[in-house]
Amino acid sequence: MTKIKVKNPLVDLDGDEMTRVIWSMVKEHLIFPYIDVDLKYFDLGVIHRDQTDDKVTLDAAKAIEQYGVGVKCATITPDDDRINEYKLKKAWPSPNGQIRSYLDGTVFRKPIIVKNIKPAVRSWKKPIVVGRHAYGDIYKAQELVIPTPGRAELVFTTDSEGAHGETKVVVHEFKGPGVLMGMHNTDKSIRSFAKACIRYAISEKIDLWFGAKDTISKKYDTRFKNIFASEIVEAMKDMQKAGVSYKYFLIDDAVAQVMKHEGGILWAMKNYDGDVFSDMIAAGFGSLGMMTSVLVSPTGKFEFEAAHGTVKRHYYQYKEGKETSTNPVASIFAWTGALKKRGELDDTKDVVQFAGKLEKAVLDCIEEGLITKDLMSLVDNPPKKHLNTAEFISAVSKKLAKEMK
């Protein structure tokens, strides 16, 4: 059969451990047999990042900026144990964080809904999308371990022409050992975040929530709240036309409210809050393996990724030759999301249609009880036996072949 031609290149960002194995299987069995695409390949596996002093991560971000659409496998952000395990030069920063920072993007995570998996929260009927601010906060923080008594100060020295001097704030008078963190954000990035969330809510025609803690953080979080509010005022006509409303909550109130809500909303959050609660939403709807994730820049660049980690435990089982049943759905949907967007931008309907057929093949398998181990306790009327990873991908491949005929 003639392969479907993708007009413009797609940036392929490879990753680590079990998800790297799955990434290869997805391309081999579900993408390459049907799609003719120019992949701009970057190996973001932790070993190659170490070998290139992490230059490859910046190169990958620049490629997404150039070509417009990327698709990324899960990667390792090394801690001390990982440094020793892989004999790395240093604790390289999060690839996700670096790419988000370079593209100044917002991450949107959305659960994949299937008929035979009921959400753990009884009130949830529709997807809850998490919009995560993808810049700054603790992900670009500077930290110190305080070994002795002393004074910690926050100091700002102005660079403005004609201005001079410093502003100092005492953070804490340490009477003994402790820890210290300094973090930041920028008006530009916060404003881009607000604009991206508003555009997404309007395009999906879903209500928009934003939650922070301005009652405690009277400058930092209040800055977020006020900038968000100003962008809402600017977009109010378009929001009203789309039937989209906006609500601001304290983050703890937002958590309480979302547990009673039916869904069908975009819940916008600061970087760390979004990191934490996107996993809660994913687990509540079923599994981290059943979550889509896309990074959207203010200039309309897109990076689709698997929303979970590298599944280390399964990887070591795999290396020992043992059977694993890792859920590949999020990795597959990263590829379908990227192909859909590439097709939309290129105006190639056959590419978009292929992505839709691949997603349908995945959902049909799950709804027929052809599932990986993690879904056994979640689906209605579970089968007697789960599939391993290769068997699940093979089942999807067979469904896709029928769809393509």
Image (tube, rainbow, N blue to C red):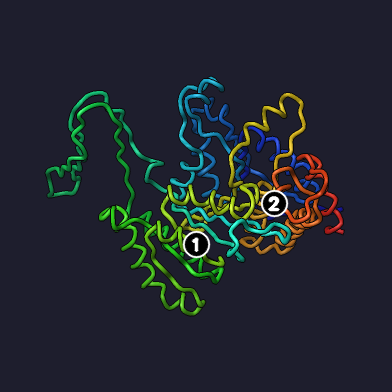
- Report the residue marked by disc 2: 378
Circle 1: residue type? Val
The span from disc 1 to disc 2 (Cα, nearest Å) is: 21 Å
Q: Quadrant for the C terminus, please.
A: bottom right
In front of the other: 24 or 169: 169
Residue 90 shows which numbered tag? none
Residue 76 visible, this orientation:
yes
Q: What is the x, y in percent for residue 377?
A: 71, 48
The answer to whether 267 appears left or right of 288 in the picture is left
Q: Is residue 361 above or below residue 76?
A: below
Q: What is the x, y in percent for residue 106?
A: 47, 54
In front of the other: 107 or 33: 107
Q: What is the x, y in percent for residue 372?
A: 74, 44
- Report the residue marked by disc 1: 258
At horizontal 50% and vertical 53% (from top left) the residue drawn is 107
At horizontal 73% and vertical 56% (from top left) the residue drawn is 359
